[in-house]
Amino acid sequence: MLLALAAAVSVLSASLVVRDERLALALAVMAGAVAIPALWVALRPWLADRRARTREAELAALLETDFAPAVITDGLGTVTGCNALARESLGVAPGRPLAEALTGRLASPAEILARLRAEARRNGGARQEIVGLGRPLRVAVRALPGLGRFLW
């Protein structure tokens, strides 16, 4: 990609030096034909990341008004977003593992959440009623396609 951009700059530079207007125009068009696809390839990951962050921010704003605790985690179980009810009732905090917040409620939260996450990856969602260290807890998860995230 850098090589393509370097070639485009070289051809464009040559078009500025050439005295023949038609040849200069042809070289400038050639430089653009090489540079535009190279720039597109370079910008695609940045655009995809920006789009994913925007979608996640929109989802977090929607969940903030939900009547149930709602948590968004990454593929490893680290909280990337949560609503006020989840912060208050579960002690969930962004940047911390969800399993950490459930340690006082479940005997082995990391294993339970990993199993549910794996099932959600396969089937799009999973849920389980768990009799933990207190009253029963219903845990449900949905995979968020295209984001690599999970909604709990």
Image (cartoon, rainbow, N blue to C red):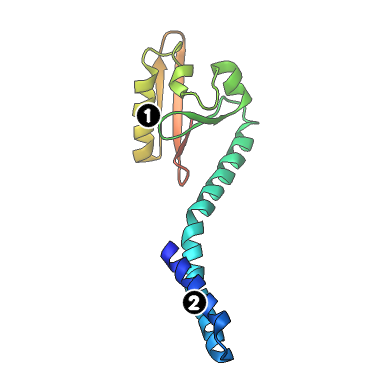
Q: Kindly report the distance in space between the C-alpha atoms of the residues bearing marks 1 and 2.
A: 55 Å
What residue do we see at 54% from left, 81% from top?
Answer: 15
Percent position (x, y) of residue 132? 41, 12
**Nearest to viewer (mark 1 / mark 2):** 2
Q: Which residue is mark 2?
A: 11
| In the image, farthest residue toward the top | 134
Residue 125 located left or right of residue 51: left
Amino acid found under the numbered disc labelled 1: Leu
Q: Which residue is mark 1?
A: 116
**Amino acid at dot 2:** Val
Which numbered disc flags the more N-terminal residue, 1 or 2? 2
Q: Is residue 76 left or right of residue 39?
A: left
For the N terminus, the quadrant is bottom left
* Side (left or right) of 67 relative to 4: right
> Which of the two residues, 36 or 95, is positioned nearer the viewer here?
36
Q: Is residue 29 above or below residue 115?
A: below
Measured from the top left, where is residue 42 in percent x and y? Answer: 48, 59
